[in-house]
Structures are given as C-alpha cells and as structure tokens.
C-alpha cells in the first residue's frame, strides 16, 4: 500500500471517528462497566457480564441480549445484538443496508481484557448519537467466548479450540452465529504474554509489541477479501494505532528463540478467524500485550492498561471498517453468493504452509532485554511466504461409505447439507488408498500427521445409508478441507477422529466427479 493511499485511508478514518459520539441521556446516571465500577480492582466474572448486558438491554431499545449457547459446564454464552434494525438482526435476517460486525472476546480464559473492551463498546453504543455508528453499522457482541476458562483463568477449560471438529459447545455456538447471521466483519480479541519463562525469557528477552493485527489468511478464502484485507484494511489499522501511540505491527507467530524463523498467523481452519474468513467475512485478529508478572502495576495485573490497549485497538478496527464499509459489505456478500455460480475447474488447496520469502530473507523485530529494560532490534530469518499445495479440483459431490454417524455429527455442526441414500447406486468415483500415516506430533486433543495417498478411478456401489454431500451449497469450498485426509485443516487432525484414517485400507470418503442419481434424505 503506497503512502498516498495510506494517507487517504487515514483521512477516511478521521472522518469516521466523528461518528463515534457518546451522548449522555438526560437524567440518567453514567453507565459504567463492572470493571470500571470496581475501580479496575478485579476482572468481570462471566455472571457479571450477563448482568451488564441485561442493563444495556433495558437502557437501549436498539439492544437485545440473547443466550446463544452454553459452555461445557452449562454456563450461558451470552451475546448482545445492537442495531437500528434490531428486529431484523435479532431474528437472523441476512445483512441489509448496515455493515454487520461480530466481535468475540476471551476465547482463552486467561485473556480477559478483550471481554472488558467489548463491554466498553456496548456502553458507548448505548450512549451513541443516532447519527453515529448505528446509522451505518450493527453489532453482534460476544464478550466471553469461553465462560468456563474465564472463571478459572485457564487458557482452555473444557473441550478444544479446534474449529474443524467442533467438539466443544462454545465453538459450535460461535460457528452457528457465523453461519446464521453472516457478519461482514469478524473481530477476534486476544492477549499474548510478553514473558515466556520456559523459552525466550531464559535467553534474557521479552517481546515488545503492544498490538498485533492479523487477517484471515487461508489460501482458499475469497481472493478479493484477502487482497483488500492485506493491502488496505490491515495497514490502515496499524497506521492509525501507531499514530495513537501504540506499538502496533503485523502479527508474527510465537517467538520462543532468538534464532528461530519468523512466520505469521495460522493458515488452517482450526481457528475461528480463518473459519470466519472462509464464510465470507473480513476477519481480523487483534492481539495485545499481556504484561509480565512480578512487576508493580497501578491495578491488579495491569488490567486497566491492558483493557485500554484492547479498547483502543477494537475502536480503531471498527473505525477503519466503517471508513471502508461499502467495499467491505460488497466484497463479503459477493463471496457468500459465489457458490451459486461455480466455475468450471474450480480448485481448493488442501495444504498451506509458510516458507522462506526470496524477496525478504530476514525480518527485524524489537525485543526488550530483561536485564536493563532496553529495546534491542533482533534480526530473524523470515519464512512469511504462504505456499499452498495439494491443489484439488472440486468434485460434484462426496460419498461417505462408513462411519456415517460420526461424520453426520460433524456435518450438522458445520451446517453442511447432506442426504442419506435409501437405495443402492452405482457411480464413478475417485477412491483414495492410504498407504502410510505417520504422526508428526501430538497436542492435547489434536494430532498432526504425514500421510501418503494414492488416487484411483473406480466404479463403486454405494449401499443404502451412504451419506451423499453435494458441493452445490454454501459450504462448497469448506467441505473438501474438512473431509479430505490430505488436508491440514481436516477433522482427522483432531484426536477424536484420527483413527478413522486407516493405512492399508480404502478410504471411506469418495469423490464423485460427475452426476449420479441419488435418493433423498
């Protein structure tokens, strides 16, 4: 993005800022969030979040609180819908004239500042002028995406963050919103610790960023959304944050060693940001600094400063999106309609990895020395080039010939349409033979594997009970990424489904390249 374009973008954001006009309603007491009421003495509990949303709902006729799901332990997962067209929004209507924005906080229970910032946004929306934000935008706010983890301070309490398998009720509820409400913009708020006691700190360093911004970056996301996000939206956010005094940059992966190679955010669909991008949203990660323990702060764990960083970042993202709202809405909605007119020879990439970038061999990143608190710029090898591989031309359909109950559950969680064959059928199919599968590493409830696959064409007999999944549906490009064993976003990367891939056997997921007569569900 050149300097002139960046300047024009900044001017648009300045103009959009004028629309953020909090106006106190005459005769009413100033509304404060629970964190503010406590004097920043303690983090807001999940129960207090729900109570605050009820207060907002009572004060603001354009706001409605709703329970969108429950956590693994049964705690409510609450959302706040805010819109000048509230009845249409709360009823699940497709986006209309207003830019639809979804914001989620505290998906990791030990990162509470995002939830606090969302409550501050709700507070401002209650007091906003009718000529302000709600004249052009509407909001779905989910302050606490992980109520169980927030109560215990654990990163992940129950279940898993893996969005491919959707085994946790929290993730299912959030994906339900993404699919039903179709937000134009999705914002995911996180915090990252600057002090890594078992790795970087042993080498004498802390990370020094205050805010990092990432976009949805799987190669199968709509090309126009990726281009506009990369070239216009993200640079404008970072530039504005820097102007406001925050040390902001493009997101880089976890730094654990001063000699490691540097890449960017995850490329798979295991995280919510990339899944939202696959659904057609301009999807953005905001990650601010979680300050190191052991220092003296004005508030416990420096929660006031951390929340201020989150709120400034959230506000800036919203204003940048507001300044570009017409293009964002048009691109998002065009991406969602694209399945209706599939292109001949359309392909997806089953795998994406980072590799060294010949145009940029190194990257300079400031780190803070623990010994004297001075900032030192370190040069790292740079592997920030996204390299997609395993291109697959989309078939007409998939047929599931075994493990139907397990796969059916995933399809329904993912809002993927399917039928059950009632009569046998013969079809030409691409059969995949798994000749080898080696586990490359295991994380809690997730596995990663190297796999050898040989394709062959065959005439197959599909028995009654076979699941038939046509690709002429909204989840068209998502389906192969979940079902193909060679995809690094597949559901078989999750430990609960890894044993479905059996070496030496014909794989039970068949590609159907052409038309085939099937029964109805």
Image: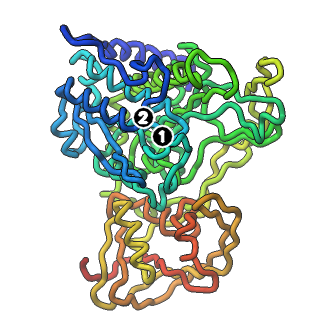
Would you say 518 lies left or right of 404 here? left
Residue drawn at x 80%, y 28% as measured from the top left: 378
Would residue 241 be visible to someone looking at this image?
Answer: yes
Splitting the image into 4 quarters, where does residue 328 fall?
top left
Residue drawn at x 26%, y 27% as measured from the top left: 56
Q: At numbered mark 1, what does the secondary structure look like: helix, strand or loop?
A: helix
Residue drawn at x 17%, y 39% as measured from the top left: 88
Task: Name the quadrant of the N terminus.
Answer: top right
Residue drawn at x 60%, y 31% as measured from the top left: 250
x and y percent of residue 268 in the render?
A: 55, 53
Query: Foreground: 395 or 203?
Result: 203
x and y percent of residue 513 in the render?
A: 43, 76
Q: At numbered mark 2, what does the secondary structure look like: helix, strand or loop?
A: loop
Residue beneath label 2, please?
45
Which badge, 1 or 2, comes first in the chain's sequence? 2
Residue beneath label 1, please?
150
Q: Mark 1 near mark 2, Cβ–Cβ under 8 Å? A: yes
């Amino acid at each position: 993005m050149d300097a002139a374009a960046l300047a024009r973008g900044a001017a648009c954001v300045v103009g959009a800022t004028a629309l953020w006009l909090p106006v106190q309603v005459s005769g009413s007491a100033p509304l404060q969030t629970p964190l503010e009421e406590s004097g920043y003495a303690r983090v807001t509990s999940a129960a207090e979040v729900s109570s605050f949303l009820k207060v907002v709902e009572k004060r603001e006729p354009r706001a409605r609180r709703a329970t969108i799901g429950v956590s693994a332990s049964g705690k409510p997962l609450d959302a706040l819908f805010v819109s000048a067209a509230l009845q249409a929004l709360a009823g699940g209507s497709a986006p209309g004239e207003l830019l639809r924005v979804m914001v989620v906080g505290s998906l990791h229970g030990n990162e509470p500042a995002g939830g606090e910032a969302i409550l501050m946004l709700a507070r401002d929306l209650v007091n906003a002028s009718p000529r302000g934000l709600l004249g052009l935008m509407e909001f779905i706010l989910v302050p606490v995406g992980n109520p169980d983890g927030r109560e215990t301070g654990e990163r992940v309490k129950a279940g898993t963050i893996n969005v491919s398998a959707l085994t946790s009720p929290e993730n299912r509820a959030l994906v339900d919103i993404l699919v039903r409400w179709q937000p134009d913009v999705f914002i995911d708020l996180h915090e990252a610790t600057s002090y890594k006691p078992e790795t970087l700190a042993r080498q004498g360093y802390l990370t020094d960023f205050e805010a990092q911004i990432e976009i949805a970056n799987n190669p199968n996301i709509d090309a126009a959304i990726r281009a506009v996000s990369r070239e216009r939206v993200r640079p404008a956010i970072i530039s504005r944050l820097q102007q406001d005094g925050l040390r902001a940059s493009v997101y880089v992966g976890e730094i654990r060693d001063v000699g490691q190679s540097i890449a960017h955010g995850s490329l798979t669909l295991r995280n919510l940001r990339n899944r939202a991008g696959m659904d057609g949203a301009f999807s953005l990660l905001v990650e601010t600094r979680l300050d190191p323990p052991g220092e003296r702060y004005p508030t416990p764990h420096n929660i006031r400063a951390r929340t201020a960083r989150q709120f400034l970042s959230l506000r800036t993202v919203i204003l940048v999106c507001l300044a570009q709202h017409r293009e964002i809405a048009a691109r998002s909605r065009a991406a969602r309609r694209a399945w209706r007119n599939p292109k001949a020879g359309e392909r997806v990439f089953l795998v994406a990895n980072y590799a060294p970038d010949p145009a940029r061999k190194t990257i300079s990143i400031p780190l803070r020395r623990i010994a004297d608190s001075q900032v030192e710029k370190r040069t790292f090898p740079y592997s920030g080039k996204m390299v997609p591989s395993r291109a697959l031309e989309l078939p007409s359909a998939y047929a599931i010939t075994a493990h139907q109950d397990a796969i059916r559950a995933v399809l329904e969680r993912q809002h993927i349409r399917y039928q059950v064959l009632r009569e046998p059928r013969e079809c030409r199919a691409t059969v995949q033979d798994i000749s080898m599968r080696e586990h490359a590493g295991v994380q809690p409830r997730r596995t990663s594997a190297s796999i050898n696959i040989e394709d062959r064409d065959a005439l197959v007999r599909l028995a009654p009970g076979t699941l038939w999944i046509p690709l002429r549906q909204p989840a068209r490009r998502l389906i192969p990424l979940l079902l193909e064993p060679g995809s690094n976003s597949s559901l078989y990367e999750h430990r609960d489904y890894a044993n479905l891939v059996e070496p030496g056997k014909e794989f039970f997921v068949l590609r159907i390249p052409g038309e085939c007569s099937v029964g109805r569900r």
